[in-house]
Amino acid sequence: MKVTTVEEYLKARKNIVDDALDRYLPGEDNFPGVIFKSVRYSIFAGGKRIRPILCMASAEAVGEDRETVLHVACALEMIHTYSLIHDDLPVMDDDDYRRGKLTNHKVFGEDIAVLAGDALLTEAFRLMSKRELAGNIPADRFLTVINEISEAAGFLGMVGGQVVDVRSEGKEIDEKTLNYIHTHKTGALILASVRAGAIIAGAGEYELAALSEYGRHAGLAFQIADDILDIEGERELLGKNIGSDKSRGKATFPAFFGLEESRRMACELIDKALSDITMLDGKAEPLRMIARYIIERTV
């Protein structure tokens, strides 16, 4: 597709991901209906689809068609959505709203919300491992990607970061712990999204190294930008209450460094991300647009 504005690009790619998710997920008429309604409620509650879009953009940056990685891109969104459903639960962040709608447990109950998250996480790996969706791509590439995404989502990645996050609430922490939380809780899955697209596309050693650094820097910048939006964002645009990080004593970059320094750090990380992929040609322009969007966004 012709690259125009980042807003048009993201909207078009979001539509592609949403259509695919609708095909891959069972309909609400399946039994037991409540679990499929719960899963679909959260999957289609909104969201920017940044992780699947990064996966597709990374594949295209090294010359592969987005359709080749579409099912993996959708699996990444399922994993992300599972994490949000569980994060919103009373035993975690206890949030009532997500993306302008009542959180899953407020609509379906805590028991079904837990199971909906479990179902999405499990379905993500079933989807990634479906051989008929791999086309002519060697199976070992998908095996590598599944291994990396497993690590990014588990206790060496997102889960580990979340553990340290909840254990750090209301406590004084050092910079090393702060970086651990952000690079694992959020950054790990974003990095895995970029690497997944590149690996499936058959990226060379230098291309994969460049895209990995891009994903690492962009992932951390994304979470810092989220921390800033929790202070400066508008509730109507974000679709959730702002200021919740401060009220819970969350370990965030603004709490540790202050707003201005956090903003400077996020901009510096994006500059690094852009520099990381200088070697890539015009096919990587969507990745450059997404990097800039990370620190310019209002949602």
Image: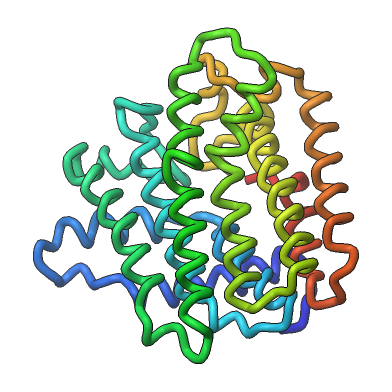
Residue 200 seen: yes
In the displayed structure, 200 sits above or below 231; it is below
Residue at 37% x, 63% y is 124
Q: Which of 278 and 25 is in front in this view?
A: 278
Q: Residue at position x 26%, y 56% from top?
A: 119
The image's colour scheme reads rainbow
Q: How many marks?
A: 0
Q: In which quarter of the image is the N terminus?
A: bottom right
Q: Is residue 85 left or right of residue 64?
A: left
Vertical order, 208 against 83 (above or below): below
Name the quadrant containing residue 8.
bottom right
Q: Where in the figure is residue 128, as x and y percent of width and height?
A: 40, 70
The part of the image, by quadrant, that contains residue 207 is bottom right
Q: Which of 103 and 128 is in front in this view?
A: 128
Q: Where is residue 10 in the image (x, y as percent from the top left)?
A: 65, 66
Tell whether 77 sits left or right of 179.
left
Q: Which of 112 and 123 is in front in this view?
A: 123
Left or right: 192 in relation to 32: right
Q: Is residue 21 above or below residue 98?
A: below
In the rendered image, the residue lying farthest to the left is 31
Q: Which residue is drawn at 69% across and 38% down?
A: 225
Name of the residue lying farthest toward the bottom: 136
Q: Is residue 289 visible?
A: no
Viewer-side residue, 60 vs 148: 148
Give coordinates of residue 149: x percent, y percent: 48, 57
Residue at 23% from the left image edge and 59% from the top image edge: 37
Q: Height in image: 25 above or below 210? A: below
| Position of residue 221 measured from the top left corner of the image (x, y, whole percent) | 72, 41
